[in-house]
Amino acid sequence: MSITSPSIDKVKLLERCLGNSALVEKLRIAFLSSLPSERHLLQDAIEICDLSSVARIAHKLRGTASNMCAIPLSEAAHQVERVARNNEIDLIAERWWDLNQQIEKSIDALSVRDSNPL
């Protein structure tokens, strides 16, 4: 795997952490472990049409993903947040599918360890 994947900009993340690969590893583990529960919370909120919770959870995921340099995930979370805040129920399923795909890609990118620092 290359240092920079389409899902996570690992070079930028390492720069953001001032080259501290131990910190990056700690953040990687924490973020990786949080993604399944965030996805589950969002899915539950979507299933009961709790758009306020959908927007809140998506906003949190958006910020965390941005901090982890997972820009495609952050953008997908932003789209879910936007349609939830605008009560665009007809678009939730499509945006949720996109977000789910980005969560999977991020999990895959974060799960692979190589000889290069993350």
Image: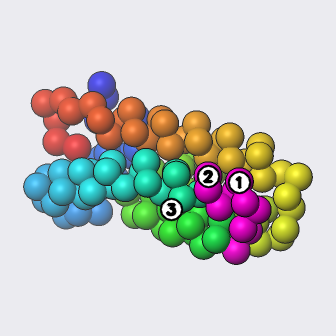
Q: Residue at x 61, y 56 (%)?
A: 44
The quadrant in which the C terminus is found is top left
Q: Is residue 47 magenta?
A: yes
Q: Which residue is mark 3?
A: 61
So how many labels did they put on this image?
3
Instruction: Please tell me which residue is depicted at 64% across the width and 71% down the height of the picture.
Output: 53
Which part of the image, by quadrant, shows the N terminus?
top left
Helix, strand or loop status at disc 2: helix
Q: Quadrant of residue 117?
A: top left
- Segment tinted magenta in the rendering: 43-52
3 vs 1, front mark:
1
Q: Position of residue 4 (x, y in %)?
A: 36, 37
Residue in view at x 43 percent, y 41 percent:
106
Per the rendering, the mark at residue 112 is: none
Give the distance between the C-alpha atoms of the residues marked 3 and 1, in whole angstroms: 18 Å
The answer to whether 54 is drawn above or below residue 118 in the figure is below
Q: Position of residue 47 (x, y in %)?
A: 71, 54
Mark number displayed over residue 47? 1
Q: Position of residue 23 (x, y in %)?
A: 16, 60
Q: Are marks 3 and 2 in contact (CB under 8 Å)?
A: no
Magenta stretch: includes residue 3: no
Instruction: Give the amino acid type for the residue marked by disc 1 in the picture.
Output: Glu
Indicate the position of residue 57 as horizontal and vertical percent values.
56, 67
